[in-house]
Amino acid sequence: MEFAENIFVSLKQGILKVLANFLPDWMVVLAAILISITAIAIFGPVTMMYLTWLERKVVGRIQNRFGPNRVGIFGLLQPIADGIKMLTKEDIVPESADRVTHFLAPVIVVMPALLVFSVLPFGRGMTAVNLNVGLLFFLAVSTLSTFAIFMGSWGSRNKFSVLGGMRAVAQMVSYEVPMVLSVVPVILAAGTLSTVEIVEAQAGGKWFLFTPWGFFACLIFFLCGVAEVNRTPFDIAEGESEIIAGFHTEYSGMKFALFYMAEFMGAFAVSGLTVTLFLGGWQGPWLPSWLWFLLKTYLFVLVMIWFRGTFPRLRVDQLMGFAWKVLLPFALLNVFVAALWTLLPAPKNHLVALAAEIAAVFLIWFFSRKDAPQKRTYTYAT
Amino acid sequence: MTTGSQTPLETQMLEVSVGPQHPSTHGVFRMNVVLDGENIVKLKPVMGYLHRNHEQLAENMSYLGSMPFTDRLDYICGMTNNFAYALAVEKLAGIEVPEKAQYIRVLMAELTRLVNHTLLVGFLLNDLGAFFTPVLYAFREREKILDLFEAVAGSRMMVNYFRFGGVKADLPEGFLGKVKEILRNYPKFLDEFERLLSENEILRSRCQNVGILTKELAVSSSITGPMLRASGVNYDIRKVDRYSIYDRFDFRVPLGSVGDVYDRYYIRILEMRESLKILEQLIKQYPEKGDIISAKGAQAAKTPRMWKPAAGDAYARIEGPKGELGFYVVSDGTPKPYRYHVRPPSFINLTILEDMCLGHKVADAIVILGSVDIVLGEVDR
């Protein structure tokens, strides 16, 4: 048990101990950093590879089919086959494209997706960098991918790409606001921006999900997160049926795969952060902490895949309307409720906050109800 | 309007050519779109990429010879295309159709309607951005009906099943049992589909009040089929003409009230339920005994290159799944038709596309196109 819990931590320390025998101290410190970097640089892409496999399998099952099952048992080698195919594919750059931008965009898009892994607490003592502004770092870095997306769309000089890029930027600007606001209650309650300490604040099953404000903040955060990583039903930047493939229309081979990789790693990271903020991170009984983290994260990843298998896409104006008219006021009210919950004197605060939350939900429902689509009845000609 | 020193930002229109290679134009169809941001200012449909000289070909071969080619018009509904062409030539040559063949024909036509509407709803959802789930559910049900077509005609889509004065072959044994099974399961499937789709808030908000087609415009631009009825016009050729034996069945014509994409979508679901009702009545009335082709028709089928209808012309039309499908045939007394003309519903329903799309977003244009229900094989012929 103890062994399973510490397997990764002890592995790193073991390697460092061996290295310390024949390396100077400063190089051991460097090696410690390098080990963390290598671990993330391997974990990210491998996760992505098997997320594509998982998505194809799960969506396949949703759609009454098997999904990949030709390469390896259960198609487990499919991601590798895909990788080989992507690597050996011809790389096509449009003649009129801005070659530098076109080349740089897929390279840059992966970086923020990998960087955010550095502040995710994968388990007890398993955070690559324990930043005291970890949460802020995550939110700031994850938005950087939009620059790369816009670079790619502008650099390809394709009208569909430009449309997709514009959509991506507008979407990011809109969804970043409620996303950040939905995190504020957590910061209020935990009193810290460090992801590690936020997890520790939820020790003993006191997950923020179980508070009224936490529940709705989790909902808002996850929805915004799905929108941030451009996944169904918020995938208007790709908008396959409308603008062909959006920002990556002109990309093929490995460059396309890099965009895909960024999307999947982003999806994993956002799920991981949702778990960290609201579901107690790696906290949980019996199983090793890192396993708990992965289990909870994959729960959210599966929800995203489930979305993909069932939902049609929203239109661009509806998407913006949803962010500004529903999510933003709700997130603001939620901050207020969380403030009541944490700052009022002890006996009455929970009751007051609960009442305020119910009032908030009612308010949002009341004002957004007129935008809701109607049920229709049909007549028959005689 | 500008106030004070503020001047509006200068913007440019974006001209985009959606198609002919585009995932959602249902084939090689092109829309030249002028966009102001995401809004459509101008839209021009461009057809002709799949032109195959269908009419000219038919004028250079025997009457029966172009029967297989009609399958390739609207390749999803081979049976109804056969039906309309057979009706036209029967009218031209005055061929009677025996009772049993009439029943088989209506059976096939209504099954085709089920196939077409199911697929349309699936593809419409794909246009809305769903990731293939509704399409594959639709395909699952369609396969069962295509199996029946294969059993009876030997081919799943290119059926070539109808003959002048009847049909090619009798129903195989156990066929009606299979139809009954489909009739039992289809309502369940439709309910499932509706739970997944009609009650989906994203679908509703994407479809409602999008691409409204008014009654007046629909009538004046000769729109037909479910699209016309979604605009609230009570016009179903099965009721108006009562061709074949449609007067023996009791079914209703659902009508929309707004004429938007959602109405067009839902009218099709309701029509499928009515088709099921027709099929149920048909199976009860089905005569086990009887000829499947009249003597005169058999003569035409036996020696197609010698067969000459008397000089004259005839136009016959049916309520195809997509709208009024008509064939106009002129005979000059030779074995080849002097003139052969198709009135394709997809093509004529498509002419109204710009009026429905103006002022909407790009994403809406795709959905509106999907709700028109076109098959490029029929648009371009």
Image (cartoon, coloured by chain):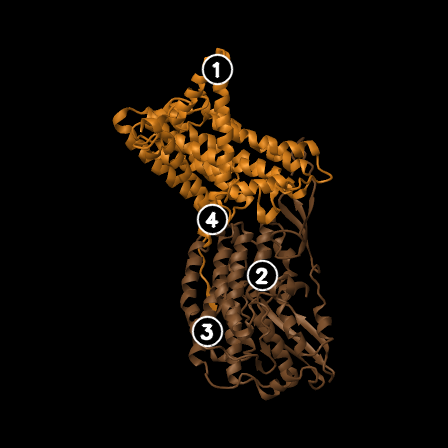
Which element carries disc 1, helix, strand or loop? helix
Q: CA distance from mark 2 to mark 1?
A: 67 Å
Q: Which disc is residue A59 wearing?
A: 4
Q: Secondary structure at mark 3?
A: helix
Q: Which chain comes out orange in the rendered image? A: A
Comparing marks 1 and 4, which lies closer to the viewer?
1
Q: Nearer the viewer, mark 2 or mark 4?
A: 4
Q: CA distance from mark 2 to mark 3?
A: 23 Å
User: Picture coordinates of residue A273 (x, y %)?
Assistant: 43, 31
Q: Compared with residue A239, is residue A175 higher up or lower down, i.e. above or below? A: above
Label 4: state its secondary structure: helix
Q: Amino acid at mark 1?
A: Val
Name the kind of residue labelled 4 in the image: Val
- Please report, as a chain letter, where disc 3 is located: B
Which residue is tagged 3? B279
Q: Which residue is mark 1?
A: A28
Which three-letter amino acid code belongs to the residue tagged 2?
Asp
Q: Quadrant of the C terminus of chain B?
A: bottom right
Residue at 31% x, 25% y is A344
Name the amino acid type tagged 3: Leu
Residue visible at 58% across and 55% down in the picture = B368
Left or right position of A348 against A269 = left
Say which element carries label 2.
loop
Q: How far is mark 1 from mark 4, CA to CA?
A: 45 Å
User: How busy is the neighbourhood of tag 3: few (under 14 within 10 Å), some, or many (20 plus)?
Assistant: many
Q: Quadrant of residue B160?
A: bottom right
Taking depth in this image into account, of B186 and B230 the one nearest to the observer is B186
Badge 4 local density, few (<14 within 10 Å), some, or many (20+)? many
Which mark is on residue B373? 2
Q: Nearer the viewer, residue B199 or B103?
A: B103
Chain to which mark 2 belongs: B
